[in-house]
Image (cartoon, rainbow, N blue to C red):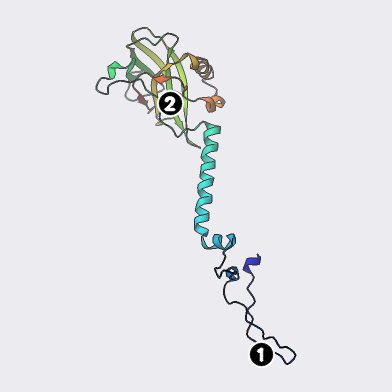
Amino acid sequence: MSDDVPHPRATNAQASPASTTPQTSAPIGDPDETPPADGKPKRPLTRWLKDHSRVATAVAVAALLVAVAALGRDYFGWSAGPNPPTATTPTSDPAALPVIITGVVPTDGKPGLGGSVELQLSVNREPEKGHEYWFFSELRLPNPTHTVYYAVKHVSDEIGARRYVRDLSKATKDWPRTWYIVDVSPQDLKYVRQNHENLDDTSWDINRHFPPDSIIASNKWTVIRTRN
């Protein structure tokens, strides 16, 4: 670049017999600091970048990370926001929730959770008119890390105990998933039903977000398959 070309340095020279005007020396110093009329050197952008290369690199890296995060949010549905809302209840009284999960047990009675488990829950309060209760499974997937929400099953809204058998034979061992019941609003019902209808279609996973106008109506239960 032209900014890297050394500035010619002239020296005071004795006037030749044919000249009546003495030669003057050019200013000695960095070519980017040639004094203007006011005597203060001007520093162009190239010199600033040269002196602040680490700062410029850090700014560029930060901008790249912001762009990647925005792409992940738009393409994969990642969210840096809060967790899905939960029905309000005193922490000292979980039974005050509309629905409470009371247990997840193996159907074969053996220790640990195998390929078939039973979800046990109790409906304490019916949902509002037009709303439905749905059993959701929340799963964190890698490469890249993102969360998917599976609408597993519609839950009867009649008050009382319920038991639902869930097949985990295809679930990865030692990989946790979180189960809970969602109070689905009328606005979200169409999407939740589509989510359920495409439950076995992995290509549909990119669409499995939490229904935005709905809330979690129960406690959460972490489920980990530990054996066959």
> Farthest residue toward the left?
92
Identify the residue at horizontal 45%, vertical 35% (top origin).
Answer: 80
Q: Residue 134: where, in percent of width, then height? A: 43, 16
Pointer 1 or 2: first along the chain: 1
* Residue under pointer 1: 14
Q: Residue 81: where, in percent of width, then height? A: 43, 32
Front-most of 194 and 114? 194
Front-most of 43 and 209? 43
- Exactly how many numbered labels are in the figure? 2
Front-most of 119 and 219? 219
* Residue under pointer 2: 138
User: Mark 1 Cα within 10 Å, few/some/many (few <14, many 20+)?
Assistant: few
Q: Disc 1 or disc 2, which is closer to the eye?
A: 1
| Residue 101 relative to residue 151: left or right | left
Front-most of 10 and 101? 10
User: Mark 2 Cα within 10 Å, few/some/many (few <14, many 20+)?
Assistant: many
> Farthest residue toward the right?
18
| Residue 210 relative to residue 203: left or right | left
Q: What element does badge 1 sit on?
A: loop
